[in-house]
Image (cartoon, helix red, strand yellow):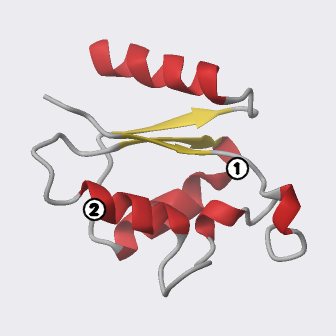
Amino acid sequence: MLTPVLLSGGVGSRLWPVSRESHPKQFLPLVGDISMLQETLQRTTGMQAAAPMVVCNEDHRFMVAEQLRQMNLQASALILEPQGRNTAPAVALAALKAVG
């Protein structure tokens, strides 16, 4: 079965001062009333897929959990990175979790 993987990383430094390291762009409602993360989660609803897996920085785990709760969604896994290391390691972690 397909498992959506959401990579919720980055600090959005080009969007400063709106986006900050403690509250980065993915948690902000930039276009509508919901955050970019929630917009992406919304796109996974209605799919013939497993619950989404979210990879995020360990410092943002509570923001991710709260945004999932607001949408009445539960992630199949919340993978916490101790520090950001770009896309490839995040995808590798998600792949390892998906097959293991």
- Structural distance between the alpha carbons of marks 2 and 1: 20 Å
**Residue at the left extreme of this rendering:** 48
Numbered circle sitting on residue 79: none
Q: Is residue 22 above or below residue 86?
A: below
The quarter in which the N terminus is drawn is top left
Residue 30 in the image, given as x and y percentages of width and height: 62, 78
Q: Assess disc 1: are there few (<14), some (14-19) or many (≥20) residues with their C-alpha within 10 Å of its C-alpha.
A: some
Q: Secondary structure at mark 2?
A: loop
Residue 89 in the image, given as x and y percentages of width and height: 62, 19
Would you name the residue on which mark 2 appears? 73
Q: Is residue 92 above or below residue 15?
A: above
Q: Secondary structure at mark 1?
A: helix
Residue 3 in the image, given as x and y percentages of width and height: 26, 34
Where residue 14 sits, quadrant-wise, is: bottom right
Q: Nearer the viewer, residue 68 or 87?
A: 87
Would you name the residue on which mark 1 appears? 59
Tell me how many marks there are.
2
State the residue at coordinates (46%, 59%).
65
Q: Between disc 2 and disc 1, whose residue precedes?
A: 1
The quarter in which the C terminus is drawn is top left
Which mark lies nearer to you, 2 or 1? 2
State the residue at coordinates (64%, 54%).
60
| Type of the residue with mark 2 | Leu
Kindly indicate whether the residue at mark 1 contacts the one at mark 2 (C-beta within 8 angstroms): no
Q: Assess disc 2: are there few (<14), some (14-19) or many (≥20) residues with their C-alpha within 10 Å of its C-alpha.
A: some
